[in-house]
Image (spheres, rainbow, N blue to C red):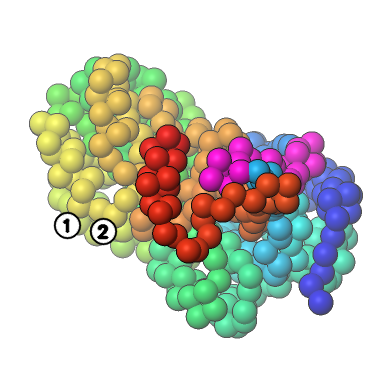
Amino acid sequence: MSYKLNISSRKEALIKLLDVIIKHENEIIQALYDDFKKPPFESIATETSYIISELKDTIKHIDKWAKIKKITPSILNFPSTDYIVKEPYGKVLIIAPWNYPFQLAICPMISAVAAGNQVVLKPSELTPKTSAIILMIVEKVFQHQHVKVIEGGVEVTQKLLAQRWDYIFFTGSVPVGKIVAKAAAEHLTPITLELGGKNPCIIDETANLKLAAKRIVWGKFLNAGQTCIAPDYILIQEDMKSHFVDFMKNEITNAYGKNPKESPDFARIVNEKNWHRLMSMIEPEKVIFGGETAVEDCYIAPTLIEENDLDSALMQEEIFGPILPIITYKHEKEITQTISKYEKPLALYVFTDDRKFARKTITNFSFGGGCVNDTVIHFANKRLPFGGVGHSGIGAYHGQLSFDIFSHHKGVVKKANWLDLNLRYAPYTNKIDTLKKLLKWL
Ligand code: NAD
């Protein structure tokens, strides 16, 4: 027997969840700080307040989103009433990453619950304090057979993936995304994969460089660069580079002071393993700003790199840290050559005052989502789909779309009995002309 909840019970659970999260907001912020010194401002802006707003929105709209939706019927079926019924998939597995460990675990869970599913949630083992808070909150709000948190590392995730699910929602890296996709294929389980990639940030000769630098510094060094949609590398018109680098240096200092290690607004690398991974990518002779590090604190300063070599370690995979390579181009075609070297990214940013160039860039390249003249902020609009394409992911969510991806959409035709046209029934003799005429008329 599957576990079923009507809309009002789902809403009740979500209201309780909202209440518990608001009550424990300070503890959540503290857990995020303990895990990797996430600055409280960033925790509020990108984790707790985001979730509170998502919850309020879902509670407000759940009746509308869940409603049976009438659809214009096809004249071919006349007379009929057509509609879409949204039904919960059933048992949903949600696997979360560590970089926004509260938001990226709770956000899909809210929608899975709203859509009427049972949920098993696996938070990241790399942020244990946040994982413990998530467990505590879920246990306070939900019955075990409704939502259950299972903590643990790779082995636990593998065991979970070996079970049969009705839907799997995964946020994490591309290699693990492939493992999830393979496991899901075993039972033909539908999936959403929210993955990563190398996100280009293009700056042409018409861009407002000072403002671009300010917005790039914010989007890149937020969460110490450990953001799936952070700009991964800069592609800038050759003549603009030295001005841009000066603006970047100023903006980094404005944001984090002369010694970012002392700044309360700059997070740490999540663990030593990732610190070493990032360190192995830095070639000291290419550092043009920053470069200071401290292993005991998992610290890497906001670092700018002069990069001309797409075969360097830094340009092989998603960086996912506070290191920003700056690559120059002479001619527009070099932009295409560089971006095309990589899989389709999760985000793309273009800084320009040239509308045609902006439009061309947005339409010519395939990417999950992005901005013209800013970074990262497309995430904030719940009415925009959020997700990747190709290697950066499958499917998109946020707002109503999240409710919809956790629901199976059943298309139903309710045929009336007061009329039954004979045309479709065999024998078809002498009916082809009438069929053709009808189809032409339609
Ligand atoms: P990850 O893929 O290493 O881990 C994600 C989850 O998968 C964790 O819960 C972990 O326990 C599990 N896992 C790890 N290895 C596994 C294995 N071999 N088998 C089964 N399960 C395994 O990712 P991460 O390091 O936590 O997060 C960073 C990555 O996530 C980056 O690539 C980033 O771009 C991506 N990301 C994407 C989004 C998005 O919305 N698209 C958001 C945040 C992070």
Q: Is residue 111 left or right of residue 379?
A: right
Give the residue at mark 1. Answer: 311
- The image quadrant that residue 47 belongs to is top right
Give the residue at mark 2. Answer: 316
Amino acid type, mark 2: Gln
Residue 439 seen: no
- Per the rendered image, the range of residues in magenta is 59-78
Q: Residue at x 22, y 32 (%)?
A: 236
Which sits in the foreground, 194 or 296? Answer: 194
Q: Is residue 30 left or right of residue 440?
A: right
Q: Residue at x 54, y 78 (%)?
A: 187
Earlier-in-chain disc, 1 versus 2: 1
Q: Is mark 1 within 8 Å of ligand 1?
A: no
Residue 200's x, y, as percent?
A: 31, 41
Amino acid type, mark 1: Asp
Disc 2 element: loop
Which sits in the foreground, 399 or 83? Answer: 83
Q: Residue at x 54, y 66 (%)?
A: 190
Q: Quadrant of the C terminus?
A: top left
Kindly check if marks 1 and 2 are in contact, taking CB atoms under 8 A apart as contact: yes
Q: How many marks?
A: 2
Mark 1 burial class by Cα count in 10 Å: few <14, some 14-19, many 20+: few
